Amino acid sequence: MARKPLTEPRKTASQERSRATVDALIDATARILVKEGFDKASTNRIAEVAGVSVGSLYQYFPGKEALVAAVVERHQQEIMQTFREGVAGILAQPLEKAIRQIVAVAVKAHRVDPKLHHVVAEQIPRVGKLEKLATFNGENYTLFRTYLESHRHELRVDDLELATFVCVTSIEALTHNAVLHYSKAFPDETMEALVDESARLVTGYLKAS
Amino acid sequence: MARKPLTEPRKTASQERSRATVDALIDATARILVKEGFDKASTNRIAEVAGVSVGSLYQYFPGKEALVAAVVERHQQEIMQTFREGVAGILAQPLEKAIRQIVAVAVKAHRVDPKLHHVVAEQIPRVGKLEKLATFNGENYTLFRTYLESHRHELRVDDLELATFVCVTSIEALTHNAVLHYSKAFPDETMEALVDESARLVTGYLKAS
DNA sequence: ATCAAAAACGAATTATCGCTCGTATTCTGT
DNA sequence: ACAGAATACGAGCGATAATTCGTTTTTGAT
């Protein structure tokens, strides 16, 4: 019987104190990623910043990658939460309104800790467990597709799959780039104009002429 | 006088032989990046694969980062070359045709060594010198803007700067995602449809109704 | 043929970092 | 108050790189 190596730390933190340790470690990782960049995020450094010993770190995480993955996952959860709230009840809305709202929410979502988002997008190599953390996630995709399906009769696209791809990819890229690369070049009023333009782009593409 | 540290290797390779060495090193780096991934690209490994000693490596490159930067730069040059050729004489074309051609060329450009492109996009942390190697480059942007300016009268957009951003970002993201993430999910015919759809997206947005 | 500059070599040094493990401390239930 | 379980500690081991430098080989000019 090949026994699984006992080196797999179980994070089953049962006591209050240990849960705090886990949180401190994830927080510290996020702070380091933002303030010092990915390469400075060594396990020793993370433990130090968290005010915890390396030993404790390895009690709860199998390694650095797991820490980073935890940070990314937490961040994506926050973003998705923002997103879900923002698009609630959108199915009932007409196309123009719905799209505009989706774009606006996408911008808002990208503004949930933009610094961290930037690091995640630009500095973290997607290797190993991080590989599956795709650029845009599936829930998003499904959400949008569902809207398109329920409004199919108003649309002039025939391949909904393809249309979803086109729309989701465009909106994601536009909001991502605007917030993370051009937030200085784009003053607030330009950002609003960008939301309008993006919405027009997508609406024009979808709407039956 | 604070003298610059002599540790800065100058790549002034004067002889034929040394230029070959430099090439071999860059080639080897690219091959390793593609076949084994970013973390396996150590200086010793690169030298080994290049059939060259580590010492020689440091004669011409200050470190691993410089090697990777050289690979990325070379790759971007190739892509831009493809791009330039593909959009030559496009200024004379009408909007629909021009946009379609641009999209098609963007797909073609993304297919110049997609494996390497994938590694560059997903695995290489943009830190230090790699930071400025932006996702989409300025020449592209300028090229597109020039087209829009010369066809301004046909368009219904008023802010050309913003319009350029919207179009370039969308086209880049759509072609990038399609080629690098969905090339298996998208059979060739779907890819063609995608080019059509992308062109329609952008054309509809730009064209005066 | 001779020599100095250029290029190449690679073992050895140095640096970094992930991770372990024996020990100390704290908590929880009785 | 006590015991055992959970948590925390952190110096130090081992592995993997990065980088140097004294030496050798090749080249081009004279």
Image (tube, coloured by chain):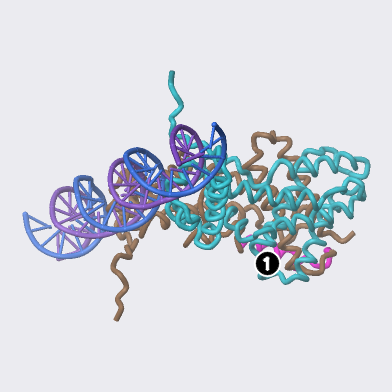
Chain colours: A brown, B cyan, C purple, D blue
Location of the N terminus of chain B (image quadrant): top left
Q: Is residue A152 one of those drawn in magenta?
A: yes
Magenta segment, which residues? A139-155
Query: Where residue C8 appears, x then y in whole percent?
Result: 46, 49
Chain letter for mark 1:
B
Query: Where residue A115 appears, x then y in whole percent?
Result: 54, 42
Camera-side residue: A9 or A139?
A: A9
Query: Is residue A17 toward the left or the right of residue B28 in the image?
Result: left
Query: Where residue B162 appears, x then y in whole percent?
Result: 77, 40
Query: Where residue C18 appears, x then y in whole percent?
Result: 35, 55
Query: Is residue B150 toward the left or the right of residue A23 in the image?
Result: right
* Helix, strand or loop for disc 1: loop
Camera-side residue: B156 or C3?
A: C3
Camera-side residue: B32 or A20?
A: B32
Q: Residue at x 57, y 56 (%)?
A: B119
Query: Is residue B67 toward the left or the right of residue A55 in the image?
Result: right
Dot 1, crowdedness within 10 Å: few (<14), some or many (≥20)? few
The residue that disc 1 covers is B183
Q: Quadrant of residue A89?
A: bottom right
